[in-house]
Image (cartoon, rainbow, N blue to C red):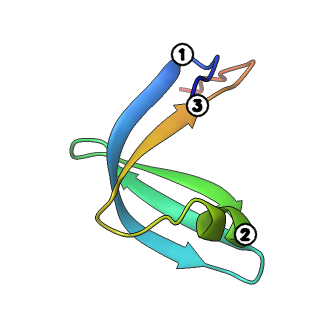
């Protein structure tokens, strides 16, 4: 698989929280957790499972910082 996004962070799925239509996939990236919201259909199609490796791919045109 090739993706143009440069922000690819490998980790391990630690939890999948399924809602009615959307799942929250929690990925441990070395002591920190990134959460992705994806469709339940995508979870099934990708055969995502807790304990399996995954890559958090972050693609954004803007990053906003507040202090």
Which tag, 3 or 2, sits closer to the chain's start?
A: 2
Q: In which quarter of the view is residue 24 placed?
A: bottom right
Percent position (x, y) of residue 62?
72, 19
User: Which one is in front, 67 or 19?
Assistant: 19
Numbered circle sitting on residue 6: 1
Q: Residues within 10 Å of mark 3 (few under 14, many from 20)?
A: few
Percent position (x, y) of residue 34?
44, 47
Q: At x 53% / y 26%, what residue is drawn?
A: 67
Residue under pointer 2: 41
Callout count:
3
Residue under pointer 3: 58
Q: At x 68% / y 58%, what residue is drawn?
A: 38
Q: Secondary structure at mark 2?
A: helix
Numbered circle sitting on residue 27: none
Which tag, 1 or 2, sits closer to the chain's start?
A: 1
Q: Secondary structure at mark 1?
A: loop
Q: Residues within 10 Å of mark 1 (few under 14, many from 20)?
A: few
Does residue 51 appear left or right of residue 61 in this picture? left
Q: At x 48% / y 72%, what residue is drawn?
A: 16
Q: CA distance from mark 3 to mark 2?
A: 20 Å
Q: Does residue 34 sit above or below 60 in this rendering?
A: below
> In which quadrant of the rendered image does the N terminus lie?
top right
Does residue 7 appear left or right of residue 27 in this picture? right
Q: In which quarter of the view is residue 20 placed?
A: bottom right
Q: Does residue 34 sit above or below 62 in this rendering?
A: below
């Amino acid at each position: 698989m090739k993706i143009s996004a440069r922000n690819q962070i490998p980790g391990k799925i630690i939890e999948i929280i399924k809602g009615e239509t959307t799942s929250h996939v929690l990925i441990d990236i070395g002591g920190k957790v990134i959460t992705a919201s994806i469709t339940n259909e995508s979870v099934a199609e990708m055969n995502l499972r807790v304990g399996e490796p995954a890559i958090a791919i972050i693609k954004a045109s803007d990053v906003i910082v507040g202090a």
